[in-house]
Structures are given as structure tokens and as C-alpha cells.
Amino acid sequence: MSDTPPACLNPTLLPTAPKLDRLDPSLIPPPAQATNNSL
């Protein structure tokens, strides 16, 4: 498990994330922006 990065960092586990991000980045902002918005 140590060799496997978190799902949020590993796009391979969530192939739909990058696809949606390319289509509508506004709907799915990068994790960095999401963290900033939360703060």
C-alpha cells in the first residue's frame, strides 16, 4: 500500500476525473483549489 499513492493523486484509479476535468474544469476544480476554497 505504501507504493500506491492516494486515489486523489493517482488518476489511474479514477480515469473519469481527468476526463471530466478536461471537459468542464469548473465543475471539478483541482484538489489544490478545492483545499483553498475549504479554508
Image: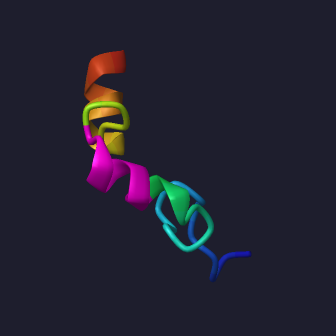
Does residue 14 lie above or below 26 as drawn? below
Q: Residue furthest right?
A: 1
Which residue shows up at 28% across the image and 55% down it? 22
Find the residue positioned furthest to the bottom.
3
Q: Is residue 9 left or right of residue 31?
A: right
Q: Residue at x 47, y 62 (%)?
A: 9
Image quarter of the C terminus: top left
The spot of residue 7 in percent (x, y) is: 59, 59
Q: Is residue 39 visible?
A: no
In the rendered structure, does residue 15 fall within the stretch colored magenta? no
Is 33 located above or below residue 19 in the figure? above
Q: Give left or right: position of 13 versus 1.
A: left
Residue 19's image quarter? bottom left
Q: Main secondary structure of the magenta part?
A: helix
- Residue 1 image offset from top left, x and y in percent: 74, 75
Q: Is residue 35 placed above or below 16 in the rendered structure?
A: above
Q: Which residues are magenta?
A: 18-25
Q: Quadrant of residue 37?
A: top left
